[in-house]
């Protein structure tokens, strides 16, 4: 079973920031938080990941709480093309064949 | 990011026949590849983990004799659905990890293959 909890759906206005929450209260010390998204009928796309520090890349920002029990993915200026299902996943990093286990994700709809 | 391709992108086959789906890492070597299945309006379900040169590890409930996985090279893994039935109709997605980037390597996904069994 997935180790994360996400709201099933969210709406956002185009041009505004989209803030997607994720609860991972049972996260272990060696587990990272990964975010992927899946646009309809496509393969998932990697967005960002982090351990305990906030992270930012060209796509998004990831804010992880100090106790690491929750995080927020921020799309600073959402566009219609950001409409997708967003998955928050926790996974250990290291050698071996660590698996990405997908939960139900959050369906984000960006409205014009 | 790294590119993973799948072929074919969609396939229609008759019940009882076998179908092979290819997954390739185009610009990196993938020691490990993963196969997922996704039914309409559901999340991705991991089917198996494939390591180059060794047998695949299947998730609980996935029939290894029905879903044959071969990972013969560092850039190619294949999934063969044997004796396909209509209930095997699904979206099959592969992913690969670029170990050349070290332990920080992320997992990249192919575009998926839509299988319809009639």
Image: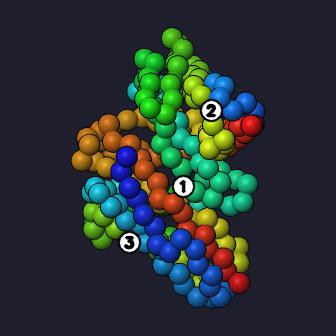
Q: What is the x, y in percent for residue B12?
A: 63, 81
In the shown orientation, is residue A95 left or right of residue A34? left
Q: Are marks 3 and 1 on the same chain?
A: no
Task: Name the residue located 35 percent from the left edge and 60 percent from the top edge.
Answer: B25
Label 3: how many Cα within 10 Å (few below 14, some 14–19, many 20+): some
- Quickly name the residue at label 3: B70
- Between the residue at mark 2 and the residue at mark 3, the CA separation in whole angstroms equals 40 Å
In the shown orientation, is residue A71 left or right of residue B30? right
Q: What is the x, y in percent for residue B81?
A: 54, 77
Q: What is the x, y in percent for residue A8?
A: 74, 37
Q: Are marks 2 and 3 on the same chain?
A: no
- Quickly name the residue at label 2: A78
At mark 1, the secondary structure is loop
- Between the residue at mark 3 and the residue at mark 1, the CA separation in whole angstroms equals 21 Å
Q: Nearer the viewer, residue B43 or A26?
A: B43
- Quickly name the residue at label 1: A43
Residue A20 seen by the camera: no
Q: What is the x, y in percent for residue A32?
A: 45, 29
Q: Are marks 2 and 3 in contact (CB under 8 Å)?
A: no
Disc 3 is attached to a residue of which chain? B
Label 2: how many Cα within 10 Å (few below 14, some 14–19, many 20+): many
Seen in the picture, residue B62 relative to A31 is either above or below; the reply is below
Seen in the picture, residue A36 relative to B52 is either above or below; the reply is above
At mark 2, the secondary structure is loop
Seen in the picture, residue A9 relative to A19 is either above or below; the reply is below
At mark 3, the secondary structure is strand
Label 1: how many Cα within 10 Å (few below 14, some 14–19, many 20+): many
- Between the residue at mark 1 and the residue at mark 2, the CA separation in whole angstroms equals 20 Å
Task: Name the residue located 66 percent from the left edge and 76 percent from the top edge.
Answer: B116
In the shown orientation, is residue A39 left or right of residue A32? right
């Amino acid at each position: 079973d997935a180790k994360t909890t996400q709201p099933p759906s969210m709406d956002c206005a185009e041009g505004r920031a989209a803030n997607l929450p994720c609860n991972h209260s049972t996260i272990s010390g060696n587990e990272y938080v990964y975010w992927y998204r899946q646009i309809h009928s496509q393969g998932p796309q990697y967005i960002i990941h982090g351990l305990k520090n906030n992270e930012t890349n060209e796509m998004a920002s990831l804010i992880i709480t100090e106790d690491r029990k929750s995080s927020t993915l921020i799309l600073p200026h959402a566009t219609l093309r950001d409409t997708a299902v967003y998955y928050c996943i926790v996974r250990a990093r290291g050698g071996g064949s660590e698996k990405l286990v997908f939960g139900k994700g959050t369906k984000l709809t960006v409205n014009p | 990011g790294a590119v993973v391709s799948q072929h074919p992108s969609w396939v229609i086959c008759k019940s009882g026949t076998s179908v092979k789906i290819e997954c390739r890492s185009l610009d990196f070597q993938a020691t490990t590849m993963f196969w997922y299945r996704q039914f309409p309006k559901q999340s991705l379900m991991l089917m198996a983990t494939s390591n180059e040169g060794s047998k695949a590890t299947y998730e609980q409930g996935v029939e290894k004799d029905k879903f044959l996985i071969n990972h013969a090279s560092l850039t190619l893994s294949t999934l063969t659905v044997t004796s396909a039935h209509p209930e095997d109709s699904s979206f099959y997605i592969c992913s690969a990890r670029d170990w050349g980037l070290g332990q920080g390597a992320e997992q990249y996904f192919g575009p998926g293959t839509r299988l319809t069994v009639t």
